[in-house]
Amino acid sequence: MKLLHVQSQELLNCMCKEVSSLNDGQMMKAQVRLAIFRSIEEGNFDFIFGMVKAKPILKWSRGVDETSIFSFAVLHRQPKIFSLIYGLPIKKSMTTWVDNKGNTMLHMAGMTGASIQINQIPGAALQMQRELQWFKEVESISVPRCKEYSNTDGLTPRELFTKNHIDLKKEGEKWMKGTASSCTVVGALIITIMFAAAFTVPGGNKQDTGFPIFLDERLFMLFIISDALSLFSSTTSVMMFLGILTSRYAEDDFLESLPRKMIIGLSTLFFSIAAMMIAFSTALFIMLQEQYSWIIIPVICLAIVPVTLFVLMQFPLLVDMFMSTYGPGIFDKKMKRWV
């Protein structure tokens, strides 16, 4: 694969050298134009970067529908290729280009093109979030009149986005509610268990004072603290999931509001399960430490199992959602001027 990459780079260098020697008329021939747009569709960043750098006029290339290369990159959701626009001093003027159907670059962000990258995102809610991120990013560099510009169908970019994302929005709402409902049941069970455990402490209470028998034990304080942390974190988790279930599910809610609630809910639920296992293991150790101390290590090992299972099932989703919401983003806004 390394040899193949080196050979491909050498071939690309030869092509760029040949292209740089052509005049502008030869440059805009169909073969070169089709190669440019096919590379955008496939996400071939190196080819686009090399070609346009060798012959800057190629950045004005038009597709069969009079689509610009950056509008085409938006349509096919190619963030790395689209990021090249940040290195152009005329990036705002390029957002005003329209195709033969009156669609601007912002209209392209409102369409649902067949994109492999979007389909690789887990969950309809995160896919809806990614679509909104694309729309908001293109909107941020567009001139104000593009936001209200109507295409030949009489639709503004926002109206086109709403029309094309109705099904994805419904699927995202269904996915969010399903996940929140399942996690709410788990959180409610933990609240019930931890609340009861706080008043039925291991060893019982003294008859004369009512204080716990093992109150002076250090491990007993660990039991109380872990029990309280589990109760408070699971309550927070349930409140976050209830906030998801009662949300109005507007389009912009998928951008940050709903993912933030899901991140907090899953994080606190994970913490509450871990604290519950600590409280359970501590209670057993307090009661059995004198005569059955050998059973402590197997119990602790078994207590790790549900925590590990939850991490394996939900932690990748939590990481994906956190990176998608608060990560560095998919666009390279620090792209330097390259042509």
Image (cartoon, helix red, strand yellow):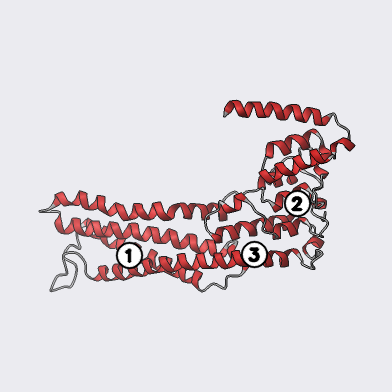
Q: Which numbered mark, 1 or 2, is in the foreground of this view?
A: 2
Q: Which numbered mark, 3 or 1, is in the foreground of this view?
A: 3
Residue at 38% from the left image edge and 67% from the top image edge = 187
Q: Is residue 329 visible?
A: no
Q: Amino acid at mark 3?
A: His
- Answer few, some or many: residues within 10 Å of disc 2's Cα (few below 14, many 20 plus, some between 14 and 19): many
Which of the two residues, 187 or 201, is positioned nearer the viewer here? 187
Q: Amino acid at mark 2?
A: Ser
The kind of secondary structure element at disc 1 is helix
Q: Amino acid at mark 1?
A: Ala
Mark-to-mark CA distance, 2 and 3: 19 Å
Of all residues shown, which one is farthest toward the front? 31
* Discs 1, 2 touching: Cβ within 8 Å: no
* Discs 3, 1 touching: Cβ within 8 Å: no
Mark 1 or mark 2: name the one nearer the start of the chain.
2
Which of the two residues, 39 or 296, is positioned nearer the viewer here? 39
Q: Which quadrant does the N terminus fall into?
A: top right
Residue at 67% from the left image edge and 64% from the top image edge = 164
- Answer few, some or many: residues within 10 Å of disc 1's Cα (few below 14, many 20 plus, some between 14 and 19): many
Q: Is residue 151 visible?
A: yes
The kind of secondary structure element at disc 2 is helix
- Which residue is under mark 3? 165
Mark-to-mark CA distance, 3 and 1: 43 Å
- Which residue is under mark 2? 71
The kind of secondary structure element at disc 3 is loop
- Which residue is under mark 1? 228
- Answer few, some or many: residues within 10 Å of disc 3's Cα (few below 14, many 20 plus, some between 14 and 19): some
Mark 2 or mark 3: name the one nearer the start of the chain.
2
In the rendered structure, the answer to whether residue 236 lies left or right of residue 258 reads left
Q: Position of residue 220 (x, y in %)?
A: 23, 60
In the rendered structure, the answer to whether residue 217 lies left or right of residue 105 reads left
